[in-house]
């Protein structure tokens, strides 16, 4: 059994990759180093807003990866065979592969400016002989790689799609009764209120309000809501908010009792799309970064044209700029044309039970083929086997 170390931290591994720990490719096992005293101290510091502000100010002012490297460096286990880096450059001697995660700017702390300034340094690290492969989660990330890196780097790059682990569940057949109130679902982050904006929370709420004028519908919002919006949302009896962590079986229940995922995100949402597809929900979203790699118009959902009013999309650093004050201010100024496009598509699904079912089944088919654990592991095994060759 070959050992692979998650780098820099197995404890911070994103939900989308945790299935690698429970369902690794044949012949491999993933592990992580014990958290050091330094890492524990850094994690405590990150809880303070002033520390986070100073950290990002340092990155913005000096555009240096020094502090980033210092805070992500992790002890390497002696007998591991391979390092699997999750978006962090590794400068040791062991063979390693790196997962780009969302987009290549993540190779420099999710900072486009830092990425551009350190591009030569990043390329040099990726071209090292012991860097065996560069993994991209989808075609959109691969296209950005091709824009910035040499052919030698691109030749090392392979697409390894995210996968969703099978779950035993019983579909709630009540949702197919014609007289049942249609349940619309929006999935966000329960930890970061800013994700409400990035994942399309403002647009989802406004779209729902339009639909309420004509239909008996309800909206489930699983997301931390910005404080200034709480009062107005709570006044709407058709909206239910879930702001706290809930057991996994309750998350499954949300999907199996819902009819439509309304996720007008401003960039691809890692697990919400795959989870909704797995549980047979059609998806309504907008044509932003990497969405087309998961949602096919009229096949497993509807993808409406994005707003032409958001300058965020036109900037070079997009999608890295979705956590900025400028972006938050932009999305608060709701584009009524976009809301009309979204509500029209959701309305179409509300009125067409058979279409909801067909699109949902198509999504399920994708999660059992293109986005399955088996498909991912087949590619990963090939990557790891080649990396082990002397």
Image (cartoon, rainbow, N blue to C red):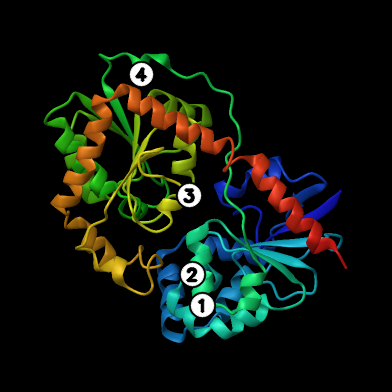
Q: Residue at x 59, y 38 (%)?
A: 369
Mark 1 and mark 2 in contact? Answer it, CB < 8 Å.
Answer: yes
Q: Is residue 215 left or right of residue 285?
A: left
Say which of 365 and 319 sits in front.
365
Residue matched to label 2: 144
Cα separation between marks 3 and 4? 26 Å
Q: Earlier in the sequence, mark 3 or mark 1?
A: 1
Cα separation between marks 4 and 2? 41 Å
Question: Whole-percent x and y of residue 9?
Answer: 65, 58
Cα separation between marks 1 and 4? 47 Å
Cα separation between marks 3 and 1? 23 Å
Secondary structure state at the residue bearing disc 3 = helix
Secondary structure state at the residue bearing disc 1 = helix
Q: Earlier in the sequence, mark 3 or mark 4?
A: 4
Q: Is residue 354 left or right of residue 40?
A: left
Residue matched to label 4: 175
């Amino acid at each position: 059994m070959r050992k692979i170390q998650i780098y820099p931290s197995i404890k911070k591994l994103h939900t989308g990759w945790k299935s690698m720990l429970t369902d690794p490719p044949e012949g491999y096992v993933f592990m992580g180093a014990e958290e050091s005293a330094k890492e524990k101290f850094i994690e405590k510091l990150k809880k303070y807003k002033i520390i986070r502000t100073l950290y990002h100010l340092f990155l913005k002012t000096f555009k240096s990866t020094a502090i980033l490297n210092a805070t992500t460096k992790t002890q390497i286990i002696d007998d591991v065979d391979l390092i699997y880096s999750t978006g962090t450059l590794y400068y040791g001697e062991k063979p390693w592969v790196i997962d780009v995660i969302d987009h290549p700017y993540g190779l420099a702390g999710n900072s486009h400016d830092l990425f551009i300034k350190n591009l030569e340094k990043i390329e040099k690290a990726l071209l090292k002989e012991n860097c065996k492969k560069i993994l991209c989660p989808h075609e959109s990330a691969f296209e950005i790689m091709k824009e910035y890196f040499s052919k030698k780097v691109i030749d090392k790059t392979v697409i390894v799609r995210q996968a969703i682990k099978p779950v035993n569940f019983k579909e709630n057949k009540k949702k197919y009764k014609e007289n049942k109130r249609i349940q619309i679902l929006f999935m966000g982050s329960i930890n970061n209120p800013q994700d409400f904006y990035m994942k399309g929370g403002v647009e989802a709420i406004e779209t729902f309000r339009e639909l309420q004028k004509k239909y008996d519908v309800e909206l489930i919002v699983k997301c931390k809501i910005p404080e200034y919006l709480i009062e107005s949302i709570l006044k709407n009896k058709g909206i239910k908010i879930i702001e706290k962590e809930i057991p996994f079986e309750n998350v499954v229940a949300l999907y199996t009792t819902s009819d439509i995922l309304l996720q007008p995100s401003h960039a691809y949402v890692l697990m919400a799309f795959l989870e909704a597809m797995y549980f047979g929900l059609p998806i309504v979203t907008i044509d932003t970064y990497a969405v087309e790699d998961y949602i096919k118009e009229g096949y497993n959902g509807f993808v409406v044209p994005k707003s032409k009013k958001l300058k965020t999309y036109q900037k070079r650093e997009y999608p890295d700029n979705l956590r900025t004050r400028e972006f938050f201010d932009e999305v608060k100024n709701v584009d009524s044309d976009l809301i009309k496009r979204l509500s029209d598509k959701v309305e179409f699904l509300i009125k067409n039970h058979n279409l909801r079912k067909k699109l949902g089944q198509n999504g399920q088919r994708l999660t059992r083929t293109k986005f399955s654990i088996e498909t991912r592991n087949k590619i990963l095994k090939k990557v790891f086997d080649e990396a082990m060759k002397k």
